Image (spheres, rainbow, N blue to C red):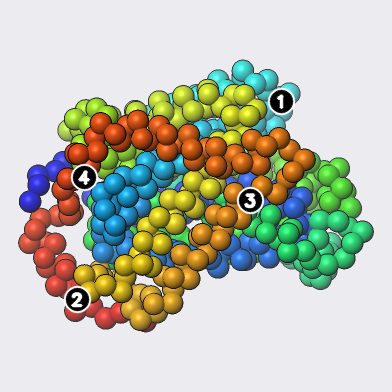
């Protein structure tokens, strides 16, 4: 058995669930895309939240099965390695790591745009936005370096913000401020034309896909979770179910509380959520909403940076990454992968600075959504193609016979949603904007080839590392075989 650095088990089921919850974040998942969804499909865009939620639930169950079998730091990277092979897994992890870093950079930039609204200042110029975003990333890095206690404190604060910004607001709007009938959910983006269009729902679903990712992050910290073969799968499923439910209900509450549908669909109101909340509860409530959005984004970025650092650390532990010897070091005081945290933070900052030009930023934002679904598709499709083999041994959480349907269904869903996200549906824009997903993927893969090529022999012979001791793993495997399927 290969001797590996030891991570501290600092997360229970509850804290692992909370970690995944704030990564997905109802505030980020809803308010980050609400205006785009209404612009694409009008009130009928609500159905896109429901469709994507349903698809991601199936994916979450598949991830839960994989996490129960292989509760190893790095999640998608580790699962893809073991399902297909080391090179396949390496590129899966590479795409996933860059997706996390790009998403974190984008989140910091969005936060810098909301801050002046909360402080009552004029909008920041680009230079100030970048400085604020860099400062935010630096603070997040420090919190991650402090360790799980600081992370749990921020996560708790974020969940309180979610309760107010999502749950309490939705209940208030439902009870006291309904302005539209429920039949408005059959209205498209053009107020003069009744009915729902497939193109509108599909475009809206592409935007919603950005919000319903991150539930797999409990698997990124699997070796830091107590009893991971049971707790990580539960955390993954609980995160998507809870966040998705809050988002779907909150989106419905906002839509039926729209005071003037024509103003929103005409684009007269640039921020529909702020318009709805302001009309119902006043401008001070809008300021509070913006503050809660900032808290939600900061917590989401904290979880994103942490997940990204764990993927990088998993690479380094396998000596499959530049400077692996240094990056895989753990803090003797906290058992934290501090080197990986610092490198991840610096990488995110460089992405942010490089993305200051319009073309680069638009390309990165488009790729960050598709990047998650590419990373999801690689292990899910592989699992669909290999699960029937006799070599497959499930963990304590197993889909059982239902997996024969759910795993292929998840594979079809992630591939279709990926195609939907990448589809060039805006011919009026420049060509590079229509094909930004392809361009972004080509860039990430090209850089990956440069890193992979000199290490290809090492990667080809990567050891299979299991968490815990051999005796513990053998006992867990025997127990897994005796555990009944969940279906």
Q: Residue at x 61, y 66 (%)?
A: 51
Residue where numbered disc 4 is placed: 460
Residue 324 is marked as none
Q: How far is mark 4 from mark 3, CA to CA?
A: 34 Å
Residue 234: percent from the left, percent from the top?
36, 65
x and y percentages locating residue 406 in the rendered image = 44, 73
In the image, is 420 to the left or to the right of 311? right
Tag in front: 3 or 2: 3
Residue that extends furthest to the top in the rendered view of this protein: 127
Q: CA distance from mark 4 to mark 2?
A: 30 Å
* Label 4 Cα crowd, 10 Å radius (few <14 / some 14-19 / many 20+): some
Gap between marks 3 and 2 measured at Cα: 43 Å
Q: Position of residue 53 (x, y in %)?
A: 56, 64
Task: Please state the horizontal and vertical placement of residue 166, each as a whole percent of the image.
Answer: 62, 55
Residue at point 56% right, 42% down?
A: 437
Of the image marks 3 and 2, the number of the one nearer the N terminus? 3
User: Mark 2 or mark 1: which is in front?
Assistant: 2
In the picture, measured across the screen, residue 80 lies left or right of residue 42, that is left
Q: Is label 1 or label 3 in front?
A: 3
Mark number, residue 481 = 2
Question: Which callout, 1 or 4, points at the residue further toward the start of the chain?
Answer: 1
Looking at the picture, tell me which residue is in the foreground, 93 or 268.
93
């Amino acid at each position: 058995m290969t001797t590996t650095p030891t991570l501290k088990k600092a997360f229970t089921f509850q804290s692992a669930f909370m970690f995944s919850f704030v990564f997905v974040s109802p505030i980020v998942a809803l308010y980050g895309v609400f205006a785009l969804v209404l612009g694409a499909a009008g009130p009928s865009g609500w159905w896109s939240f429901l469709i994507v939620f349903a698809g991601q639930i199936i994916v979450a169950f598949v991830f839960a099965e994989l996490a129960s079998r292989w509760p190893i730091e790095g999640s998608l990277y580790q699962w893809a390695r073991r399902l297909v092979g080391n090179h396949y897994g390496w590129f899966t992890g590479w795409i996933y790591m860059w997706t996390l870093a790009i998403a974190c950079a984008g989140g910091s930039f969005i936060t810098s745009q909301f801050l002046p609204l909360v402080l009552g200042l004029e909008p920041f110029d680009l230079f100030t936005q970048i400085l604020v975003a860099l400062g935010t990333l630096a603070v997040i890095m420090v919190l991650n370096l402090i360790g799980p206690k600081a992370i749990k404190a921020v996560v708790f604060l974020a969940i309180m913000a979610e309760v107010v910004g999502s749950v309490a607001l939705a209940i208030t709007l439902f009870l006291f401020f309904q302005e539209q009938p429920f039949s408005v959910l059959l209205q498209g983006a053009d107020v003069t034309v009744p009915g729902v269009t497939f193109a509108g729902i599909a475009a809206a679903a592409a935007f919603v896909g950005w919000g319903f990712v991150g539930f797999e992050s409990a698997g990124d910290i699997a070796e830091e979770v107590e009893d991971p073969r049971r707790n990580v799968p539960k955390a993954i499923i609980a995160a998507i179910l809870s966040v998705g439910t809050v988002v779907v209900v909150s989106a419905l509450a906002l839509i039926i509380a729209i005071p003037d549908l024509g103003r929103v669909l005409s684009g007269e109101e640039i921020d529909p959520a702020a318009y709805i909340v302001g009309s119902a509860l006043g401008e001070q409530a809008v300021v509070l909403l913006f503050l809660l959005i900032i808290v939600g984004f900061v917590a989401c970025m904290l979880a994103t940076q942490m997940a990204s650092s764990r993927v990088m650390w998993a690479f380094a532990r396998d000596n499959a990454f530049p400077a692996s010897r240094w990056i895989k070091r753990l803090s003797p005081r906290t058992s934290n992968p501090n080197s990986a945290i610092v490198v991840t933070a610096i990488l995110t900052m460089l992405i942010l600075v490089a993305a200051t030009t319009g073309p680069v930023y638009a390309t990165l934002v488009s790729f960050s959504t598709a990047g998650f679904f590419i990373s999801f598709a690689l292990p899910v499709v592989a699992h669909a193609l290999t699960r029937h083999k006799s070599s497959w041994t499930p963990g304590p959480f197993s889909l059982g016979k239902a997996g024969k349907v759910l795993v292929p269904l998840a594979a079809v869903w992630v591939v279709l949603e990926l195609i939907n996200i990448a589809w060039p549906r805006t011919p009026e824009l420049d060509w590079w904007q229509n094909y930004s997903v392809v361009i972004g993927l080509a860039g990430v893969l090209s850089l990956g080839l440069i890193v992979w090529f000199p290490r290809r022999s090492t990667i080809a012979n990567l050891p299979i590392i299991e968490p815990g001791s051999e005796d513990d793993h053998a006992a867990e495997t025997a127990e897994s075989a005796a555990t009944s399927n969940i279906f």
